[in-house]
Image: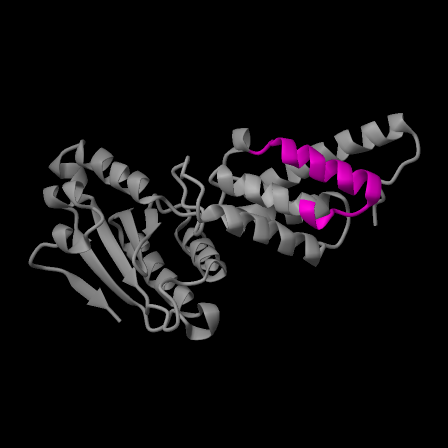
């Protein structure tokens, strides 16, 4: 295990700088989405703690989680980022630090105003961004509309609460991004359903079917059975993208 504990001030300063750079590089390599948003004052505090004390106090990790939530970073991306720090330091991830990070994120996420196009719970598009993407597609006219469609993958609502827990939402978002990466699709979570705007192709339709199956396997079957419907993208869809029924024409198909 690499040790960043040092004795002299000069050595400590170099150690912090080296660890900071390693963490940043590792975080980018493991999926950090917007590089310009990575550095925060809390990042330096966390690095200083690990470099000088070989551990991250709960309060320090919690403050980083809160800062990430305020900046619109999803819980999944936030936790992956901290794991990247331990990887950069050659250490096993500290479960207590990860727990504190998640607690700080969760406390702020409920009240923090959204400041990005990414939903903090799932890492997918916000409703506003999803609507904007449909509007952008519609601006290219009927030919472009005909090359796109909407898919809605509905999952069972939780029995004991109004919404799925944030840990399951994070896994759901990771699954959707993993399954649909490279397809040109934009996905949003709303009302116990994943809404997907995607370019029509046989390959993309196959990827959506696999995405539905992967979601059903999450949470010990908590998202099963899922149902998927496809809607042609029409002019009506551009004005009411958050209501799938408004985008549907008389012919829609459903998979179960």
Asked which quadrant contains residue 202, the reply is bottom left
Residue at image x 58%, y 53%? 103
Q: Residue furthest top?
A: 10
Residue at image x 50%, y 46%? 108
Location of residue 70 with respect to 163 vertically, above or below: above
Left or right, 244 with reference to 100: left
* Residue 22 visible, this orientation: no
* Residue 205 visible, this orientation: yes
Q: Position of residue 99 (x, y in %)?
A: 63, 56
Secondary structure, magenta segment, majority class: helix
Q: Quadrant of the C terminus?
A: bottom left
Q: Start and end of the magenta stretch?
A: 38-59
Give yes or no for residue 56 being in the magenta stretch: yes
Left or right, 68 with reference to 209: right
Looking at the image, which is closer to me, 23 or 192?
A: 192
Q: Position of residue 13 (x, y in %)?
A: 82, 28
Location of residue 230 with respect to 26 vertically, above or below: below
Residue at image x 17%, y 63%? 253
Q: Residue furthest left?
A: 250
Q: Position of residue 167 (x, y in %)?
A: 50, 60
Q: Position of residue 106 (x, y in %)?
A: 52, 51
Left or right, 51 with reference to 67: right
Query: How many numbered badges does the structure rendering display?
Result: 0
Q: How is the image coloured?
A: one colour
Location of residue 135 with respect to 223 vertically, above or below: above
Residue at image x 61%, y 41%? 27
Give yes or no for residue 49 being in the magenta stretch: yes
């Amino acid at each position: 295990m690499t040790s960043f504990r040092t004795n002299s001030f000069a050595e400590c300063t170099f150690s912090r700088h080296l660890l900071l750079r390693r963490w940043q590089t590792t975080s980018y390599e493991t999926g950090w989405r917007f590089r310009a948003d990575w550095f925060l004052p809390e990042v330096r505090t966390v690095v200083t703690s690990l470099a000088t004390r070989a551990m991250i106090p709960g309060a320090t990790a919690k403050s980083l989680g809160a800062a990430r939530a305020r900046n619109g970073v999803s819980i999944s991306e936030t936790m992956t980022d901290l794991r990247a720090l331990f990887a950069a330091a050659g250490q096993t991830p500290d479960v207590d630090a990860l727990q504190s990070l998640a607690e700080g994120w969760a406390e702020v996420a409920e009240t923090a105003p959204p400041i990005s196009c990414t939903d903090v719970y799932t890492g997918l598009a916000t409703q506003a961004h999803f609507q904007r993407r449909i509007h952008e597609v519609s601006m290219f006219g009927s030919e472009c509309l005909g090359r796109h469609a909407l898919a809605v993958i509905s999952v069972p609502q939780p029995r004991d609460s109004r919404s799925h827990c944030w840990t399951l939402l994070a896994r759901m978002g990771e699954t959707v991004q993993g399954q649909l990466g490279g397809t040109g699709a934009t996905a949003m979570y709303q009302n116990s359903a994943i809404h997907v705007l995607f370019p029509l192709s046989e390959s993309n339709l196959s990827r959506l079917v696999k995405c539905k199956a992967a979601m059903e396997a999450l949470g010990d079957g908590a998202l099963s059975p899922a149902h998927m419907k496809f809607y042609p993208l029409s002019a009506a869809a551009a004005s009411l993208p958050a209501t799938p029924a408004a985008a549907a024409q008389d012919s829609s198909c459903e998979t179960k």
